[in-house]
Image (cartoon, grey):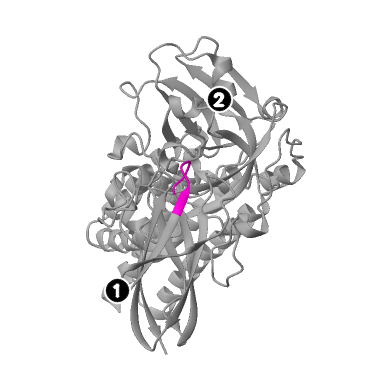
Amino acid sequence: MAGLRPVVSGVAAAAAGLGAGELVAAVLNASASPILSVGSLVIDLTPGFLKSAVIAAFGTGDKPFLIGVLLVVVLALGAAAGLLQARRAPLGVVGVAVVGAVAAVAAVTRTGASPLDATPSVVAAVVGGATLSRLVARTELPGRRAFLRGAVVTAAAGVVAGVIARAITAGQRGTQVAIGKVELPAPTATATPPAAADAFDVPGLTPLVTANEDFYRIDIALSPPSIDPDAWRVEVTGEVEHPFSLTYRQLSALPMHESPTTLMCVSNEVGGTLNGTAVWLGTSIRDLLARAAPKAGADMVLSSGADGFSASTPLAVLQDAGRDSLLAVGMNGEALPQLHGFPVRMVVPGLYGYVSATKWLTKLEVTRFDRATAYWTSRGYSAQAPVKISSRIDRPGSGARAGIVTVAGVAWAQHIGIARVQLQIDGGPWVDCELAGDWSVDVWRQWRYRWTASRGSHQLRVRATDSTGLVQTAKPAAEAPNGATGLHTVQVSVS
């Protein structure tokens, strides 16, 4: 046990320091949390291919996964610092200080950060270093029980501080209160509700509209920005004749209309669920750009969010009179949720989100593709990324009973439309599926097929054809650099 005492000391000190830092962050600024700050830095430094792999493996659980990994790393570094402190004091304490300095730098270099945001990381380093020095000094004293009691109490204090910090953060519901007070402006044009024929009543089939709480969330923010709508502004600037800015109140006073649109994440694998449909309420980006009057030669709008994200959207797409590109303030009849970009986000039909769907929007800068790059394009992703035609089998799952089985799913060819969906069973001929009505060219389309299933294992494969006659490719391609391709294939066991 004596040989493990430095390790136990380091782990306990790490827990104490981290708990203290998180508690200070909860009081001062939750987004300055040491863990969240370092996590955000890790996200920024992680290569694009690795980010895609993590998202593919964990989906919307990528952020809890990263936080869990960081906690394990912190405890492992604490154990290493304990061994180093026992063998060559005070190098263990110096190591703790270095880790704290890294966290402090990460905190103050976040978008919108202030020097005060380094405080939680500094407190974490001071508490962690002092605790490490004290505990390691006690490892040489006799009495195993006394040492263990001190280490356990120290670690428990850190855990309790962390729990209290989470409780305080949860109680700081300023943004939620602000969202609750928002009265959405009345739309000047409402979306036509879907007809009964636009949706199939099939259990397990993806609904035509995704509930807000079920809508996928992929972004670079470990903790969503907390923005006071009364203090929010968006700038329309860059290569324009008439730059201007708008407050939330001014933006809300502009003509607003509803638009049903399916959003797609470029990290969505074939058959994946990183997509969703909502009825968005917002004002036309095209009209805002007309007011700003882009200069000749400009071909891109670089949008920026409060989380440090940016997207490069073709100017021509945003000026397209036939496309409902919005600055959205509402989602499915409610104020935009915090997780999905409150107070304002971009919604652009037909483009993957990494080049169009900036949340927590703060700036629209008119520029050129040869002069500026965005968050993901600077990491090797394509500068222009129209959504690729694709389809998905939602049901049946892994098992079914022999007899008539309804196979169903969704297909999309955004801003073009789906004209045909076909199913292949066990490598046989392609058969046409029944399509639900076409509610909107910017919304996915449901399909179904009544299959007479026999007992055994079967392979189902689906493909779609868009309104121009383009057939979905069977050639597999990875999500990077501009969206996955291939045909969704499932194995079904029929009993």
* Quarter location, residue 110: top left
Label for residue 117? none
Q: Which residue is mark 2?
A: 286
Q: Nearer the viewer, residue 194 or 121?
A: 194
Q: Which residue is mark 1?
A: 4
Type of amino acid under label 1: Leu
* Quarter location, residue 351: top left
**Left or right, 339 with reference to 17:** right
Considering only vertical position in the picture, is 481 above or below 271?
Answer: above
Instruction: Look at the image and give the residue range highlighted in magenta.
Output: 413-419
Q: Position of residue 446 (x, y in %)?
A: 52, 60
Q: Nearer the viewer, residue 204 or 40?
A: 204
Q: Position of residue 460 (x, y in %)?
A: 36, 72
Considering only vertical position in the picture, is 470 above or below 375?
Answer: below
Type of amino acid under label 2: Arg
> What residue is shown at x 50% (from left), y 25% (from top)?
319
**Left or right, 375 with reference to 231:** left
Res. 154 visible in picture: no
**Element class at badge 2:** helix
Disc 2 packing (10 Å; few <14; some 14–19; many ≥20): many
Q: Earlier in the sequence, mark 2 or mark 1?
A: 1
Disc 1 packing (10 Å; few <14; some 14–19; many ≥20): few
The C terminus - image quarter? bottom left
Q: Name the main secondary structure of what is drawn in magenta.
A: loop
Number of numbered labels in the structure image: 2
